[in-house]
Image (tube, rainbow, N blue to C red):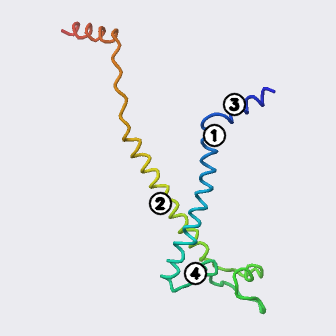
Amino acid sequence: MSMLKEFREFAMKGNVMDLAVGVIIGGAFGKIVDSVVSDLIMPLVAWIMGGKLDFSGMFFVLGKVPEGTAMTLDALKKAQVPVFAYGNFITILVNFVILAFIIFMMVKQMNRLRKAEPPAPPTATPEDVVLLREIRDSLKK
């Protein structure tokens, strides 16, 4: 019964609960960023690059293609043909850059808000310390 009690105390600590909330919000935020990338950013990038929208189909074949194999990425991978598939990487890279920029802006804003809080007033020096300083100063003279 003691281990169950210890686990409950661990799970109910503030840091663990904050982490759990952060992971859940991060997962939802990741979906938002994925949507922004796939629905808003990548169509613009595709338009700039000549109208090709599906970047996952962008690849170079590095080996010999067996006869009868379709020239799609999935078919080539099933046929174990070496393929340099850079299209999906471009999508994931854009996703990462956007996510990193948004997190940077959030941290920057949090730091700015944290600095805006007034500093705590300095605590008064205890009376015994003040007396000891006066004695020290008088001994120096």
Residue at the extreme left of the image, as rendered: 141
Mark 2 = which residue?
101
Reading the chain from its start, which is encountered first: label 1 or label 3? 3
Task: Tell me residue 67's x, y (percent).
Answer: 77, 92
Mark 1 = which residue?
17
Residue at the extreme bottom of the image, as rendered: 67
- The residue that appears at 29% across and 8% down in the rendered structure is 131
Mark 4 = which residue?
53
Please tell me the numbered disc located at residue 9. Answer: 3
Local secondary structure at mark 2: helix
Reading the chain from its start, which is encountered first: label 4 or label 2? 4
Local secondary structure at mark 4: loop
Reading the chain from its start, which is encountered first: label 2 or label 3? 3
Task: Tell me residue 55's x, y (percent).
Answer: 60, 78
| Rendered position, 56 above or below 140 | below
Task: Tell me residue 130's x, y (percent).
Answer: 30, 11
Is 139 positioned to the left or the right of 87 in the image?
left
Report the amino acid beneath label 4: Leu
